[in-house]
Image: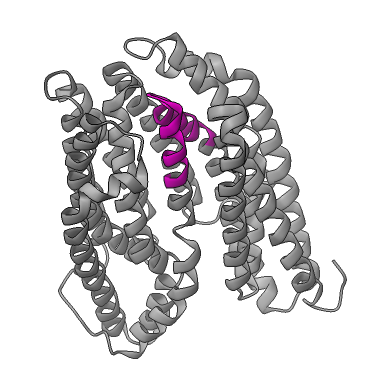
Amino acid sequence: MTLARRLIDRVFPRGALILSTLTLGYFAMGLVRNRALATTFGAGPELDAYNAAFRIPEIALDVLVAAGLTAPFVPIFNSLRLRDEPAAHDFGRTVLTVAVLVMSVVVLGLFLVAPWTVDVVAPSFDIATRGLYVELFRIMCVTAVLFAASIAVGEVLVAHQRFLFYALAPILYTGGIVVGTVGGGERYGIHATAVGAVAGAVAHLGIRVAGLWRTPFRIRLRLHVRSAPFREFVRLMLPRMVSHPIDPLTLTFFTNLGSSFGIGAITSFNFASDYQVVPVSLIGVSFSLAVFPALAAAYGANDGVTFRAILRRNVITIGGLTVLAAIAVAVLARPLVEILIGGGEFGPDDVDRTATVLTAYALAIPLDSLSYPLSRALYATHNTILQVIASIAGFGTIVAMGLALAGPVGIVAIPLAAAAGGAVKVALLTLFLVPRVRRIGAGIA
């Protein structure tokens, strides 16, 4: 094995290259989506209503389904597979059934109270935009149920290391939005985009279900909610449920704040956020996930020297690369926005506003990225509560700074508040992590 291959295997565990490549594909499709939305609708009330309509269904999905599945499902499922595969399948089917049932009930309630949610998400919308928001909100409720099923199926795929079908799903979902916008946007308006989102969600679920056919798992209804594995699953998911919705809550706060800056502000923020998250995902998320198993193994072996070496190298690498990425984003913000989404209904003023937000957002790139290796290091030491505390403190800082800066600096308050919240979160994670790392083995960090 060559030195280069050893380095690749060390950084990219099995399936990571597939995940990274398809993540790039997803971001590329996201650029196509943004271009289609910008040139079709511009930074106007239709797109503002569309973006706002996602917020509450996303929060419900994250709190009730995604939070619980992303942490405890795979360990429990694979542990059961080792000694009793039928029991593992019953557990997986129970989780899938419960996820869809719970989300269906919640979505029914959201469908009924949709007119009242606009005051929470975007209180500054005018009457016409409020009506459009309600229509789109109810369509988005359908996607939430489909995603609940797809997330559960996706965790089964991860447990079986079927990463290709797992990672293709987001690309197909975004493709549905593009097809809806390009194919029907001119004739049917933003409703065509919403219908495209539903079609994309169907494809998101469909490709993952297709991936199951090369595993022994088959979808069936099960409600073994009193079984020991499911009770353990519920117990482990509770801490994650507290912190998981913080990201969508942050987006909801930014949407609320952005609605006060006039027409197009929400759209500019959403586009800037989409571009800011690319280096965070490709570097912060991917690199920290790559070393997470090694961190957990080192902690299990009480090998403090190895744990600290892996963590230190990971933090330095992520920090260095994301600082460079932040500088590049800040310098290239305006030409990037001009090339990627400028033109059509997205005029020069829209480009300038979006580029300004993206430039300020560059400050948050290293901070957001560093939160991932620090959080995963805490998870490796079998602790989730401290990460919850840091996340809540970061969110509180975002709200306080956003409200304080909105008047003096306008829409730039959004990225500046994000950077301040990220700094507080990273500082607390570091503060919590240092003493725990020092106690691993006999060495001193």
Image quadrant in which the C terminus is located: bottom right
Of 96 and 254, the residue lying toward us: 254
Which quarter of the picture shows residue 442? bottom right
Which quarter of the picture shows residue 413? top right
User: Which residue is rendered at x = 64% and y = 48% of the image?
Assistant: 422
Q: In this image, 113 relative to 52: left or right?
A: left
> Taking the image as drawn, is residue 8 in sight?
no
Say whether residue 419 is magenta: no
Say whether residue 263 is magenta: yes
User: Which residue is rendered at x = 33% and y = 39% of the image?
Assistant: 52
User: Which residue is rendered at x = 37% and y = 10% of the image?
Assistant: 343
Of 315 and 429, the residue lying toward us: 429
Location of residue 391 in the rendering, given as x and y in whole percent from the top left corner: 58, 59
119 over 78 or under it: above or below: above
> Taking the image as drawn, is residue 289 in sight?
yes
- Its colouring scheme is one colour
Which residues are the magenta region? 252-276
User: Which residue is rendered at x = 70% and y = 35% of the image?
Assistant: 323
Location of residue 364 in the rendering, given as x and y in whole percent from the top left corner: 63, 39
Which quarter of the picture shows residue 27? top left
Location of residue 143 in the rendering, given as x and y in whole percent from the top left corner: 22, 49
By secondary structure, the bulk of the magenta-drawn segment is best described as: helix
216 over 119 or under it: above or below: below
301 over 270 or under it: above or below: below
Please count the marks in the image. Answer: 0
Location of residue 152 in the rendering, given as x and y in whole percent from the top left corner: 30, 64
